[in-house]
Image: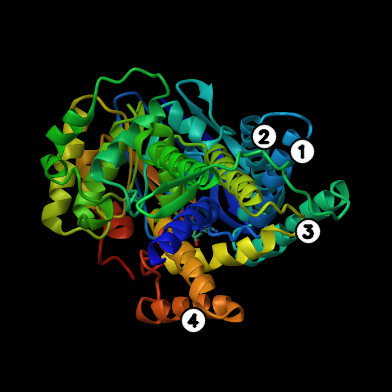
Amino acid sequence: MLLQQLLNGLVVGGVYALFAVGFNLIFGIQRFLNLAHGAVFMTGAFVAYYTVEAGGPLILGFLAAIIISGLLSVLIEIVCFRRLRKSGDAEFGAILSSMGASLVIMTVWQWISKTQVVRFPFDTVPVVIFRFWGLRVSLLQVIMMVAAVVIVMIMAWFLYRTSFGRQVRAVTDNEKAATLVGVNPNRTYSLTYFISGALAGAAGVLVGLAFNNINYMMGEPYLLFGFAIIILGGLGSIPGALLASLIFGMGQTLAIAYLPSGLTTAFIFSAMFLILLVKPTGLMGREEAGILRGRR
Amino acid sequence: MLDIADLEVRYDGIVALRGVSLTVGAGEVVALIGPNGAGKSTLINTISGLVSAASGTIHVGGEDFTHLRPWTISAKGVLQVPEGRQVFSDMTVLENLQLGATALRGRPSDLDVKDVFELFPILQERSTQLAGSLSGGQQQMLAIGRALMGAPKLLLLDEPSLGLAPVVISQVFAALRTLKEKGMTILLIEQNATLALDLSNRAYILDQGRIVLSGNSADLAADEGVVAHYLGVDAEV
Ligand SMILES: Nc1ncnc2c1ncn2[C@@H]1O[C@H](COP(=O)(O)OP(=O)(O)O)[C@@H](O)[C@H]1O
Ligand SMILES: [Mg+2]
């Protein structure tokens, strides 16, 4: 059932896109790898879980996850990155400080969840299966797909169709010039981190629902996948991250379906390695990483 | 319009400006000339708030600008065309111009994209191209157009002729002359003294962080001693 696997892979890829686009947005705008991005993702899953647990509807949990993850991401920028950025050469420092933030956030959730794996109540998303053309699609998969598409479209609309989005791209392109046309880069950065965190939080909820397994370490593998995806797509390129996410999701699903189980990860990373041999800057990357040229 | 008094600026230890005082009246074009490393860009960046003053004051239209943040200064209509153009290279020409209007923040403007296209017709032809694909001269025109979109009450230009071919320089300066005739207040930084003195009403000569000479541009241009000493291309290397 190749087609069925491809469809499943597309759904997974959509969720990866939510994670990776936000990860890459920050890299594109500041050249920082935010290693706390996985912890923000995990926070989203927990916030939705505890909202549902407290009797709230899933949609409320979803909204709460998006908002709290967004705000957490803004806080990470202010605490971990802002002062470093002012000091100039900070790429390495940013890796360390965001790793620290990640550990703090993970420890907090470990403490709140008492190191337990938690699961959404059984009927949080009713088990409904749609069948067409010989394919099976669950309601959950539909929700995942719709959420991923809608959220990515809102983000694209915001970045490419609003004047505020234009300002975000301007700061990404050339911070000094953006400042000179009257844009406050700090505000723009906060906004970008909010979007990035909100996307990660949404991905966390969807993954928590899909695998019904929420724990304080769930962000770690996604950080690795996210890293692979943005390198594959091209550092800093948003369309690249989207494309690479879908390829990665489908590749992973196919590998799981057709290869011996231990080989999945080896297969994916070998394939990625081959693609990068042919195109070292990633599928949609450019010579000098991403959309950051001109910043000095 | 612009009133700088006793300005001193340092970069970790290096003193870049030593007690600079300078004024630009409304509707005036003032040139600031000096060799490489004299502190010209430092002065303009301090006016724009990108670099902070160690001491001294900067007033614009009577208001104290000395400690304002750069985006606030731009929003108040003091707009810089930076050295090396600094266009948004991954964005289109039109988007660059639209971004220029960010500085308005509700201030009225009697100029829009059409007027910029009238001043620089080539930008209209290229309006959907990425700014990074333009030639140096076209990027300079775009950088000027972008600043104009923010309705400058004071326009700061940092070496607009830098790295451009002579024929392109004269196009850029023709546009600056048009702006001057329309009454725009301009502080023009140049290494090319002949061009700058030709366009401006008054000029200051900056050397090693100090104003060493100032006066009417015509007088300075006519003074052979000045020309030879500070402005001559071949003056003692
Ligand atoms: N960011 C900086 N950090 C340290 N020193 C600087 C910086 N910018 C300029 N300088 C120094 O300040 C002096 C004046 O530079 P600048 O204002 O760029 O001169 P100009 O524009 O006249 O060529 C030079 O000696 C230069 O090396
Ligand atoms: Mg300079």
Which type of secondary structure does the marked residue at label 3 adopt?
helix
Residue that appears at 62% across and 52% down: A86
What chain does mark 1 sit on?
Answer: A
The image quarter in which residue A74 lies: top right
Residue wearing tag 4: A270
Q: Which mark is residue A61?
A: 2
Image quarter hosting the N terminus of chain B: top left
Residue wearing tag 1: A50
Q: Nearer the viewer, mark 1 or mark 3?
A: 1
* Residue A284: percent from left, percent from top: 36, 64
The disc, 1 or 3, on the residue closer to the chain's N-terminal end is 1
Marks 1 and 4 sit apart, C-alpha to C-alpha, by 39 Å
The disc, 1 or 2, on the residue closer to the chain's N-terminal end is 1
What chain does mark 4 sit on?
Answer: A
Residue wearing tag 3: A103
Q: Quadrant of ligand 2?
A: bottom left
Marks 3 and 4 sit apart, C-alpha to C-alpha, by 29 Å
Q: Amino acid at mark 2?
A: Gly
Image quarter hosting the C terminus of chain B: bottom left
What chain does mark 3 sit on?
Answer: A
Q: Amino acid at mark 1?
A: Tyr
The disc, 2 or 3, on the residue closer to the chain's N-terminal end is 2
The disc, 4 or 2, on the residue closer to the chain's N-terminal end is 2
Residue that appears at 61% across and 39% down: A125
Marks 4 and 2 sit apart, C-alpha to C-alpha, by 38 Å
Taking A77 as reference, is A253 left or right? Answer: left
